[in-house]
């Protein structure tokens, strides 16, 4: 009886512990029950109340760094070789000349048309031509006429050279049109000045004719050389008036001529300055100095004439009643 009572008491204790575990820690109870069933090989009892097991707490999320795929390094595109250091045919007109400029001692060139240049020194390289100095003076040479090895040294590209040459032709046409318009405008100004001068000459001629008529009338009034002594004075004054009018007309004509010549010499000076800027190899410094001296002398002479004209006008206004 004591042993039976002890067994019953043990069962009750186990049941109480199981109930407490089931109530407080259901997940532990379910885990222990599953292990007992697996050990005994029995199937879980169908009449066992299945206590819902709460879902396990969400696992702590760990922030993972986003890994960005790094592209494989790309080898840089090598720069164009000097012989092709130009832009595409559809791009802007950009030419990269060789730097530094090629140079060789006693360099001799022969073009495809048979011209020889000795002791060549390169001064400027463009897409279609090269400016050089040689023992004969120098000038501009088309690169297309040079041997291939020299063309390569000058970064020659036939397609780009053609584009540059076409653009140069257009620029020259525009420059010629602008020069023609400028000359036409200056011609119109000269024509207006000539018309004004002709009108002034006409007025001076009319004044001269009037003075001559006055002189003839004075001579007729005073008779022959036996006339009183007052007559020569009157004739002399009339002659002085005629001479003064002639001198004034001459001065005005000279002033008009000087203005026209100054305009022409100024055009020559502008042409030489433009040549010095755009084609220095063909620029003639001696001719430039001569034209400059001529222009300076013309302006000095014109200033003298204008001073004389001003003095004459002042004296004439003071002597007029």
Image (cartoon, helix red, strand yellow):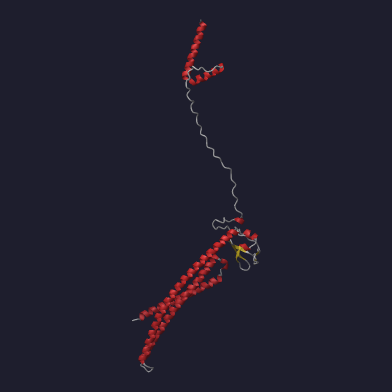
Q: Is residue 243 above or below residue 104?
A: below
Q: Is residue 63 left or right of residue 315?
A: right
* Residue located farthest toward the bottom when viewing the structure as drawn: 226
Relative image position of residue 57 (x, y in whole percent): 48, 26
Decide if residue 229 is in sight here: no
* Residue located farthest toward the left when viewing the structure as drawn: 321
Residue located at (51% from left, 7% from top): 4
Q: Quadrant of the C terminus?
A: bottom left
Residue located at (52% from left, 72% from top): 291
Q: Is residue 63 above or below residue 92?
A: above
Relative image position of residue 122 (x, y in whole percent): 61, 63
Query: 306 or 71, which is in the foreground?
Result: 71
* Residue located farthest toward the top when viewing the structure as drawn: 1
Decide if residue 166 is in sight here: yes
Residue located at (53% from left, 64% from top): 170
Residue located at (56% from left, 66% from top): 280
Relative image position of residue 237 (x, y in whole percent): 38, 86
């Amino acid at each position: 009886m004591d042993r039976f009572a002890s067994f019953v008491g043990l069962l009750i204790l186990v049941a109480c512990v199981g109930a407490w575990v089931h109530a407080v820690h259901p997940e532990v109870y379910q885990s222990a029950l599953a292990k007992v069933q697996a050990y005994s090989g029995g199937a879980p009892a169908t009449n066992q109340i299945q206590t819902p097991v709460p879902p396990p707490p969400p696992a702590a999320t760990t922030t993972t760094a986003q890994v960005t795929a790094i592209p494989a390094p790309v080898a840089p595109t090598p720069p164009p070789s000097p012989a092709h250091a130009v832009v595409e045919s559809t791009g802007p007109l950009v030419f990269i000349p060789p730097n530094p400029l090629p140079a060789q001692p006693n360099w001799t060139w022969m073009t495809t048309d048979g011209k020889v240049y000795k002791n060549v020194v390169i001064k400027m390289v463009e897409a279609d031509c090269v400016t050089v100095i040689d023992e004969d003076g120098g000038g501009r040479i088309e690169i297309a006429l040079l041997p291939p090895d020299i063309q390569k040294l000058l970064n020659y590209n036939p397609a780009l050279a053609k584009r540059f040459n076409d653009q140069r032709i257009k620029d020259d046409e525009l420059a010629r049109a602008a020069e023609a318009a400028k000359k036409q405008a200056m011609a119109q100004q000269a024509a207006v000045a000539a018309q004004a001068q002709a009108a002034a000459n006409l007025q001076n001629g009319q004044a001269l004719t009037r003075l001559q008529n006055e002189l003839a009338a004075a001579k007729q009034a005073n008779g022959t050389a036996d006339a009183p002594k007052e007559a020569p004075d009157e004739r002399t004054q009339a002659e002085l008036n005629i001479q003064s009018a002639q001198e004034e007309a001459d001065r005005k004509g000279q002033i008009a001529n000087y203005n026209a010549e100054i305009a022409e010499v100024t055009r020559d000076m502008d042409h030489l300055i433009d040549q010095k800027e755009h084609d220095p190899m063909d620029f003639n410094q001696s001719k430039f100095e001569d034209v400059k001296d001529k222009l300076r002398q013309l302006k000095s002479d014109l200033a003298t004439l204008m001073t004389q004209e001003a003095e004459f006008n002042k004296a004439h206004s003071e002597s007029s009643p």
